[in-house]
Amino acid sequence: MNLRPVRREDADALYRLLRTCADAAEQDEEVTPESVARQFDVPGLDIRQCMWVLPKDGQTLKAVVSVIPLCSEGFEVLHLGWHAHPSVRSLEFQERLVRFAEERAPTVRTRPDLPAVLHAGVRMQNAEKVQVLQKLGYQPVRWFLELSRPLREPFTRPIPPAGYSVGEGSSSAQEIYTVAHEAFQDHWSQPHITLEQFGYLLDTLGGEEHVVHTARTTANELVGVCLTRLRHAAQCASRAREAEIALLAVLRAHRRKGLATCLLHSALQWARAQGCGAAVISVDSENWTGADRLYRKLGFVERSRSVVYRKSLS
Ligand SMILES: CC(C)(COP(=O)(O)OP(=O)(O)OC[C@H]1O[C@@H](n2cnc3c(N)ncnc32)[C@H](O)[C@@H]1OP(=O)(O)O)[C@@H](O)C(=O)NCCC(=O)NCCS
């Protein structure tokens, strides 16, 4: 296959390809010209080393495939992703893309001292991608649920526990990183990202409409955080505006006091005030800290599922 490494000048063509694939309901992540361009500036990752494109002519791309290395749980996890233009999206073509990625995977590794696995996350309704992965020997290892909650339904305002305040507030990237890092550190396949990378992720959100709600002790210590952003209408299942809970974390010592409930309530209120029809959140179906139960208690219901498929690189 005549794929070549992606270049910065491919950003527009890449955006058009991803946009076409998103319209075909292949993915639900945000795709904007800015988000595509930003992929070239992630600290500690040179995307030109781990993404390849198949040009049709100078202006159009037929396909893109990427293998992104991230460390977690004593493994080097190589995140495999691919998108093919609907005009060429046969099973055989997609299989060749994945085989290409598998061949290139050893070249993107940054931690050859660790065992390496390939991970590919796909939406369950994307039968073609599921078929390709199964045919190539990938095993399903984890399910992620997308939950949603209509905002027109009423919600009862919870009272913050004594000794805490919850509300909209500003926090430094360092403070939020400390809370998120502690809260998620033993979660499945949680990549080890640096403060610099985390700050970059927050900065990129700065370009989108978003809000941070915080839970603090009376001594002003940050113990919980909830980050909510607006999705672009094109990415919303109902094509009406939706709000996405992008991060929710409470420090271990402060759990089961109702802080996440208060944070989520504030987030839902904010989303409603922005004119959103629903709030959405993605959760690991085996989240061991009870997140699934928390969301269902607040009226969230399952809307779609995605599966993470795994294959050992060896
Ligand atoms: C999930 C998390 C945010 C919950 O924070 P919290 O402040 O403890 O949540 P609340 O006190 O508001 O819990 C509300 C309800 O959720 C459910 N719940 C919360 N933690 C639970 C647990 N460990 N086991 C079972 N149910 C749980 C319960 O129904 C609880 O009500 P109850 O205490 O009256 O039984 C927190 O555990 C956390 O930070 N986990 C790690 C990060 C994470 O997984 N974030 C979500 C990613 S999608």
Image (tube, grey):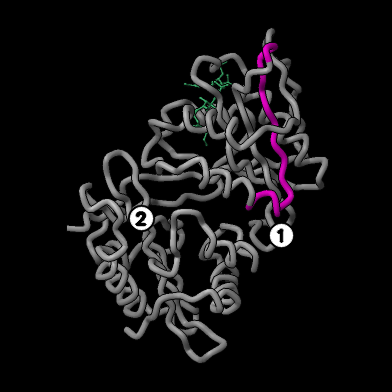
Name the residue furthest bottom.
57
State the residue at coordinates (61%, 59%): 30
Asked if the residue at label 1 sits under 8 Å from ligand 1, the reply is: no
State the residue at coordinates (58%, 66%): 36
Tag 1 and tag 2, C-beta contact below 8 Å = no
Q: Earlier in the sequence, mark 1 or mark 2?
A: 2
In magenta, the rendered stretch is 204-219
What's the mark number on residue 78? none
Q: Amino acid at mark 2?
A: Pro
State the residue at coordinates (69%, 49%): 206
Query: Looking at the picture, does residue 96 appear above or below residue 282?
Result: below
Q: Position of residue 210 (x, y in %)?
A: 71, 45
Q: Position of residue 152 (x, y in %)?
A: 78, 40
Q: Secondary structure at mark 2?
A: strand
Asked if the residue at label 2 sits under 8 Å from ligand 1, the reply is: no
Q: Position of residue 51 (x, y in %)?
A: 41, 69
Q: Position of residue 52 (x, y in %)?
A: 40, 74
Is residue 205 highlighted in magenta?
yes
Can you say which quadrant of the picture contains the C terminus? Answer: bottom left
Q: Which residue is mark 1?
A: 233
Q: Is residue 292 visible?
A: no
Of 237 and 41, nearer the camera is 41
Q: Which residue is mark 2?
A: 69
Q: Amino acid at mark 1?
A: Ala
Query: Looking at the picture, does residue 303 appear above or below residue 268?
Result: below
